[in-house]
Image (spheres, rainbow, N blue to C red):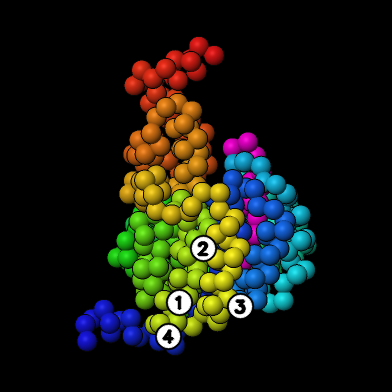
């Protein structure tokens, strides 16, 4: 037997917790326009399929409703109040980026039945999260530190950031491949370093994007290196080429003997009957989303770059490559239009001239 098969074989009987992102990361792909009925039907079907955790909120999490991040059809409270009372076993989580979301909003989330939180920072800025992580623990929430754009920090650096989050109270620390840039060896090195640095009782998680078609392979690599929590989305509904597709991931886990507790056929049915019809554009690896993965760009930038590209006559791929070169990170969405405008001007495009005259 090859070394690879030995390693894969050893995952038999490993228990992991899957966390569906379709109703939060998927909000990016839906331009924040998921209806209450869609939220309720998808969440109920995920509950029925045995998915233990689902994230429900604006794509940018608490405090996300804004000109910069777009306005959702409903407030987070309206979504939670519609969804949470319908769930039998599944718990609802939220995303909180300190500085965008507030502790008051986290308290409100808790009052409305939210039971878990990803406290998210850029991969070198864990030190912006101590109050939010500590407050989440005080509320009794299942609390995760979520290190975004993790390809921009090395394994040792991420281990230091993870230790900080653990010291603030995080019970799980995530490697978050926001750009879908990583390869399995990148994931393994980072997860392994976290696993070795953190206390045994602190879990390690992985959140992937499928821009290089690596969502499943990267998630399996993360489990091989010691991760026990994996984020994914039914039908891959998420930013960029989407998240790791949950139903595919569960099928692969079943084949490998990794225990998720999820019902594969129910997930397949829900993907086919509810998620695919919801998609305004097919969430897949295409020219622009592949560029995100290739150039290491925040997946959330995809639709912004498409819009700016159409407005200024600059191909979205060129804008994304430039954003990757500049190492733009979440929160710098305003730089997308700025970059497109500058490129149009440099190229002498008429759209740029019209903007300059305005
Ligand atoms: C706000 C982002 O969508 C968070 C996330 O899911 C990621 O960085 O990936
Ligand atoms: Mn994501």
Q: Is residue 197 visible?
A: no
**Residue for point 65% across, 73% down:** 47
- Disc 2 or 3, which lies upstream in sequence? 3
Q: CA distance from mark 1 to mark 2?
A: 13 Å
> Which residue bears the numbered disc 3?
50
**Residue at 42% of width from left, 85% of height from top?**
257
SS of the residue under disc 3: loop
Crowd band around label 3 with a 10 angstrom C-alpha radius: few (<14), some (14–19), many (20+): many
- Tag of residue 251: 1
| Marks 1 and 2, the one that precedes in the sequence | 2
Query: Would you say the residues marked 2 and 4 are in contact, meaning their CB atoms lie under 8 Å apart?
Result: no
Camera-side residue of 93 and 286: 286
Q: Earlier in the sequence, mark 4 or mark 1?
A: 1
Among the 4 quarters of the image, the one containing residue 342: top left
Quadrant where the image shows the N terminus: bottom left
Which residue in the protein does label 2 denote? Answer: 235
Camera-side residue: 261 or 166? Answer: 261
* Sequence-wise first label, 1 or 3: 3
Q: Which residues are magenta?
A: 54-68
Nearer mark to the viewer, of 1 and 3 = 1
Q: Where does the image place residue 189, in percent across and percent down from the top left?
A: 32, 66
Residue contact between numbered discs 3 and 4, judged by CB atoms under 8 Å: no
In-image side of 189 versus 264 (left or right) = left
Q: Is residue 108 visible?
A: yes
């Amino acid at each position: 037997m090859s070394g690879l098969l030995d390693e894969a074989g050893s995952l038999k009987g490993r228990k992991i917790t899957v966390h569906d992102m379709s109703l939060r990361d998927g909000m990016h792909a839906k331009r924040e326009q998921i209806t209450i009925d869609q939220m309720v039907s998808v969440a109920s079907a995920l509950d029925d399929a045995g998915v233990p955790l689902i994230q429900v909120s604006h794509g940018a999490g608490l405090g996300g409703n804004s000109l910069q991040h777009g306005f959702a059809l409903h407030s987070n409270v309206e979504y939670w109040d519609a969804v949470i009372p319908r769930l039998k076993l599944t718990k609802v989580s939220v995303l909180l980026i300190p500085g965008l979301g507030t502790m008051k909003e986290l308290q409100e989330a808790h009052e409305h039945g939210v039971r878990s939180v990803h406290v998210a920072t850029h991969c070198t800025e864990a030190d912006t999260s101590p109050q939010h992580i500590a407050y989440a623990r005080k509320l009794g929430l299942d609390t995760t530190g979520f290190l975004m754009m993790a390809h921009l920090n090395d394994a040792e650096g991420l281990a230091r950031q993870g230790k900080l989050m653990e010291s603030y109270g995080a019970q799980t620390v995530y490697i978050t491949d926001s750009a879908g840039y990583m390869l399995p060896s990148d994931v393994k090195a980072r997860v392994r370093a976290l696993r070795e640095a953190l206390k045994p009782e602190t879990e390690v998680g992985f959140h992937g994007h499928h821009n290089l078609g690596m969502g499943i392979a990267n998630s399996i690599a993360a489990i091989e290196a010691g991760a026990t929590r994996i984020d994914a989305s039914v039908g891959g509904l998420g930013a960029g080429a989407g998240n790791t597709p949950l139903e595919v991931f569960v099928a692969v886990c079943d084949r490998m003997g990794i225990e998720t507790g999820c019902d594969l056929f129910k997930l397949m049915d829900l993907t086919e009957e509810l998620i695919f019809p919801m998609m305004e554009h097919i969430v897949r690896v295409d020219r622009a989303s592949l560029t995100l993965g290739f150039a290491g760009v925040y997946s959330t930038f995809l639709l912004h770059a498409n819009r700016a590209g159409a407005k200024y006559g600059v191909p979205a791929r060129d804008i994304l490559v430039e954003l990757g070169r500049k190492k733009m990170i979440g929160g710098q969405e305003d730089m997308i239009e700025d970059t497109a405008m500058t490129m149009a001007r440099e190229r002498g495009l008429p759209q740029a001239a019209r903007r300059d005259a305005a």
